[in-house]
Structures are given as C-alpha cells and as structure tokens.
Amino acid sequence: MSQAAVELLSGGLESKVTAALAREAGYRLLALTIDYNQRHKVELQAAATIARALGAEQHIVLPLYLSRFGGSALTSDIEVPKDGLGNDIPVTYVPARNTIFLSLCLGWAEVAGARELFIGVNALDYSGYPDCRPAFVASFEAMANLATKAGVEGEHFRVRTPLIAMTKAGIVREAARLGLDAAMSWSCYDPTPDLKHCGLCDSCRLRARGFAEAGLPDPTDYSVRPPT
C-alpha cells in the first residue's frame, strides 16, 4: 500500500495543485481543512469539492475559530485592502496561521502513520507573509522531529512545499499540466454577497496576474476584473 500524506487543503489554487502533486507522486491523500471562521468561508466549499475530485482518502474540516483572537482582516472587522500590492506584511496576515495549521497536520500525521506533510506555500508571488518562506518551513520540520514520539524514535517527518519557488504563472501552468479545473478553487479574501471573487484584494490580483502571465484563460468569476 502506498504511503499516506497529510495536506493542508485551503480550497485555493495552490493547495489544489499541491494536493494533485502529492497524488501524482503516489501518496494516499489525507486532506485537512481548517474552518477558522474566516471572512472567505466559501473556500471551505471549494476545499470539499477539491477533496472529492482528487479522491482524498479522508477529508477533515476542523473548526478552530481564530476569530476569537482577531488581529487580521480575515478574522476581524478590519477592511480588506483593495488598493494593490504593497511591500509590507498586509493586514490579511493571520497571526501564526501556518504554524498553527501545520501543527494540526502534524498531529493527524503522527496518528495516521503519515510522515509527509504537504502545504502550498509560495515564496515568490505572494503577499509577503513570513510563514510562507523556506526558513519557516525548515524550522517547522526540525521542530516536528524534536516534538513528536515518531520523530524522536527516528521516523522522520518532512514538510513538502512543491510550489515554494514557483511564480504564480508557473503554478497556473502546473494546474493546466495536471488537468485541474482551476475554477473549482477559491482565492478571494473578500467575496461579494453573490459569492464572486471581488477582483481587487491582493489574492485576486495575484491570481489574475498568474493566469495573464501564463497566457492561459482565467475561469474565475470576478465582480470587478482585476488589473494585471
């Protein structure tokens, strides 16, 4: 039987491509989605659809309401910026999100006998989040092997980040190579009442730019066409 891998499945394009790459590599897919009471909860529906489409062996949607902490435009009553990409860490950063989420993946992986954790972080075309960088991933992997029974007994955990050095255009092309329906994924931080991508938040702008630079049609239903 092939090995299992736990993948953090947000419902976004990156997490979908990452899950498909894990499956292509021969892993049995255990998908973990976190319902953190995010502003864009529609991504939970996208994650469920993706998990089914990719044949995930299990898909757990775990409630963990980080809105109780606040501190982010995704979890608090803070306006999502719509004026373009900046150079600072934006208010859409959720404090320690990937550290928390990967820790949950690690807990499930240890119980399930999986030693591979997949996450769709990207360190090139992204919004500047500190927990998307190679240094963070390496540090988390080292911690995982110090903080778990499996790790200290010699069963090495690895954090797989197949997209970390890709451009957004490269990710779009990889989705096409894998035969994925990109329309199934969700990127927008601030959905409209009729559940369209807003078109102006950082995530929408990056998504649209990726399709434009890849030279591939963008199937996303935007309320306002993003500038590219």
Image (cartoon, rainbow, N blue to C red):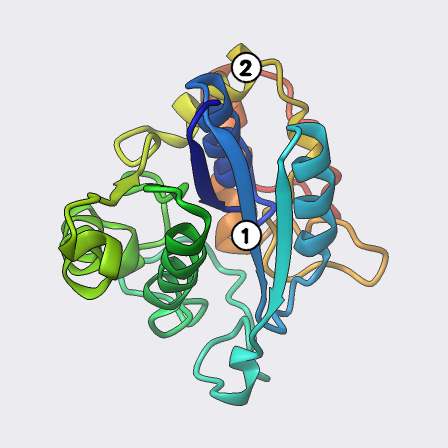
Can see residue 146?
yes
Amino acid at pointer 2: Leu
Which of discs 1 and 2 lies nearer the camera? The answer is: 1
Image point (57%, 44%), residue name:
12
Q: Which of 161 and 4 lies nearest the eye of the viewer?
A: 4
Horizontally, residue 42 falls left or right of residue 119, namely: right
Q: Secondary structure at mark 2?
A: loop
Give residue 127's position: percent from left, percent from top: 36, 53
Residue 178 marker: 2
Q: On the rendered structure, is 82 left or right of 48?
A: left
Q: Nearer the viewer, residue 172 or 78?
A: 172
Residue at (54, 14) in percent of width and height: 178
Q: Which residue lies most toward the bottom here?
A: 68
Q: Is residue 136 left or right of residue 162?
A: left
Q: From the viewer's perspective, is 131 left or right of 54? A: left
Label 1 is placed on what type of residue?
Leu
Residue 88, given in percent of the width and then of the height, sits at 27, 64
Give the residue displayed 63% in from the left and 73% down from the top: 37
**Residue 14 x/y as whole percent:** 48, 37
Q: Which residue is mark 1?
A: 32
In this rendering, the count of numbered labels is 2
> Residue 46 in the image: x percent, y percent?
70, 45
Q: Are marks 1 and 2 in contact (CB under 8 Å)?
A: no
Tell me if I can see residue 78 in this picture. Answer: no
User: Residues under labels 1 and 2: Cα distance?
Assistant: 21 Å
**Mark 2 surroundings: few (<14), some (14-19) or many (≥20) residues within 10 A:** few
Which element type, helix, strand or loop, lies under badge 1?
strand
Return the residue nearer the eye: 181 or 31: 31
Return the disc, 1 or 2, that comes first in the chain's sequence: 1
- Give neighbour class at mark 1: few <14, some 14-19, many 20+ (Cα, 10 Å): many
Label at residue 98: none
